[in-house]
Image (cartoon, helix red, strand yellow):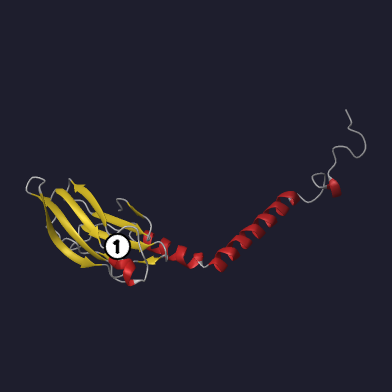
Amino acid sequence: MDPGPGRGQKPDGAGQGGAPGAEAGVGRSLASQAVARSKSALMRSGAAPRLRTLRRHLGSLEGRGMEPGSSPLTTHVLDTASGLPAQGLCLWLSRLEDHGQQWTELRKSYTNPDGRCPGLLLPGQMKAGTYKLTFDTEGYWKQRGQDSFYPYVEVVFTITDETHKFHVPLLLSPWSYTTYRGS
């Protein structure tokens, strides 16, 4: 059945002998403009450089194995409020001893300019057990003139296989923190 004159036809012959994909081209053009506007707004907000820094730091350990002589336990602290590494943050590594009764401090250290503390344990020092990383978050935020909700962060974890490498990242702001087992 013929729909009759003018029915079922698209304006300007699009779809009927018009340029193939003309409608899709308009959609892509509008999408490109929206992306450009979003990128521009992101740049104006100042968030883009912080996001790039976080991506670079979070992805910088990917694909690395445990090189000879490297520490089997590392940490990396990122200041999510500024989008930069948390340089100069004091931390302590402890191990639970005496059948779960006493924490023994193994090392006190500070994060480097990249927010890392790579050499917490020397190869051969790690043994199966329960460990604790204590981060002096109050001291870190006070140095920056910022109050914080958490005076310190303790991350307690268990190592069952001392032949593996362990990475314990900390994402930190004055009001929150997140940690996970990294690679």
- x 46%, y 62%: residue: 51
The quarter of the picture where residue 56 lies is bottom left
- x 30%, y 58%: residue: 64
The quarter of the picture where residue 167 lies is bottom left
Image coordinates of residue 105 in percent, x first then y, are 13, 59
Helix, strand, or loop for circle 1?
helix
Question: Which quadrant is the N terminus positioned in?
Answer: top right
Front residue of 137 and 27: 137
Q: Is residue 125 left or right of residue 180?
A: left
Give the crowd class for mark 1: few <14, some 14-19, many >=20 residues within 10 Å.
Answer: many
Q: Is residue 148 left or right of residue 2?
A: left
- Which residue ends up furthest to the top in the rendered image? 1
- Which residue ends up furthest to the left in the rendered image? 98
- x 29%, y 50%: residue: 181
Front residue of 71 and 147: 147
Image coordinates of residue 143 in percent, x first then y, are 32, 72
Front residue of 155 and 71: 155
The quarter of the picture where residue 177 lies is bottom left
Image coordinates of residue 162 in percent, x first then y, are 16, 50
Q: Is residue 114 visible?
A: no
Look at label 1 and name its amino acid: Thr
In the picture of the structure, the residue carrying the numbered disc 1 is: 137
Q: Is residue 55 left or right of residue 38?
A: left
